[in-house]
Amino acid sequence: METLGPRVRPGRPASGARVDARAELRKIAFWADALTEAEAARASKGISERRFGAGTYICHRGDRLDYWTGVVSGLVKISAISRDGKAMTFAGAGAGGWFGEGTVLKNEPRKYDLVAVRDTRLAMMNRTTFMWLFETSVGFNRFLVHQLNERMGQFIATIESDRIHDPIARVARNLAWLFNPVLYPEVGTHIEITQEELALLAGVSRQIANRALQTLEEAGLVRLERGGITVVDLGALGSYGG
């Protein structure tokens, strides 16, 4: 693993050099603004990097992964398979998203599988650093409250979506979750994602995802572009079929 912490730029004298820890941390973590400079420096030292190829399991259900995890680039599917073989996708995490805070707080094995949908680069904060921030930083705790509240709403919507048999609604809502302004505040209105990747997140075939996206585009909710999708009406997309 490569540690992701503040570094002095090449060619700059190390003596007397000053690095803005929050600015460095913010390159991989939007929540850095919630920390003090000292907290950001401590957080950076506890973060390491790992890369996973497309289709690779980051961890299996029941594994211990004692890291709070952020997606620097790529796409991660959070899912599980029931005893009767039914697959359920809980969420997709794109660039800028951080997940796994509940498991790290409870210090328990993962209750879901994590799969890299495409080549993915992860920033992983060890549990010791995470718990230090949790016990010390007021700003970090405020961020966590918003994060957990939004995550709970997302999972409730997942259950609802799973009971909706209309595949168009499933595709619409899974796409909308990737534009959640709390979980992914810097995603904007465009995301680079293939129809195959979206199909994996929604639990449908590529052909169904293609037809669903065409329907959503005809309804004026999205615009299909080369290499990605632009959302035109996020509110209507997130409530589609409800």
Image: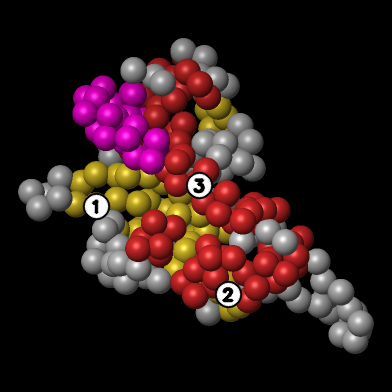
- Which residue sits at x=58%, y=78%? 2
Q: Nearer the viewer, residue 47 or 187?
A: 47
Residue 36 percent coordinates (x, y): 72, 61
Residue 39 in the image: above or below residue 70? below
Tell me how far mark 3 sits from mark 2, CA to CA: 21 Å
The quarter in which the C terminus is drawn is: top left
Q: Which residues are magenta?
A: 152-171
User: Which of the labelled discs sits on residue 222, or is there none?
Assistant: none
The image's colour scheme reads secondary structure
How packed mark 1 is, by other alpha carbons closer than 10 Å (few <14, some 14-19, many 20 or more), is some
**Residue at the extreme bottom of the image, as rendered:** 15
- The residue labelled by disc 1 is 80
Q: Is residue 145 magenta?
A: no
Q: Secondary structure at mark 1?
A: strand
Q: Nearer the viewer, mark 3 or mark 2?
A: 3
Kindly report the secondary structure that dominates the magenta region of the rendered protein. Answer: helix
Residue 15 percent coordinates (x, y): 90, 86
- Which residue sits at x=40%, y=64%? 104
- The residue labelled by disc 2 is 46
Residue 24 percent coordinates (x, y): 73, 64
State left or right for residue 219 relative to residue 140: left
Q: Secondary structure at mark 2?
A: loop
User: Which of the labelled discs sits on residue 145, or is there none?
Assistant: 3
Q: Amino acid at mark 3?
A: Val
Tell me how far mark 1 sits from mark 2, CA to CA: 29 Å
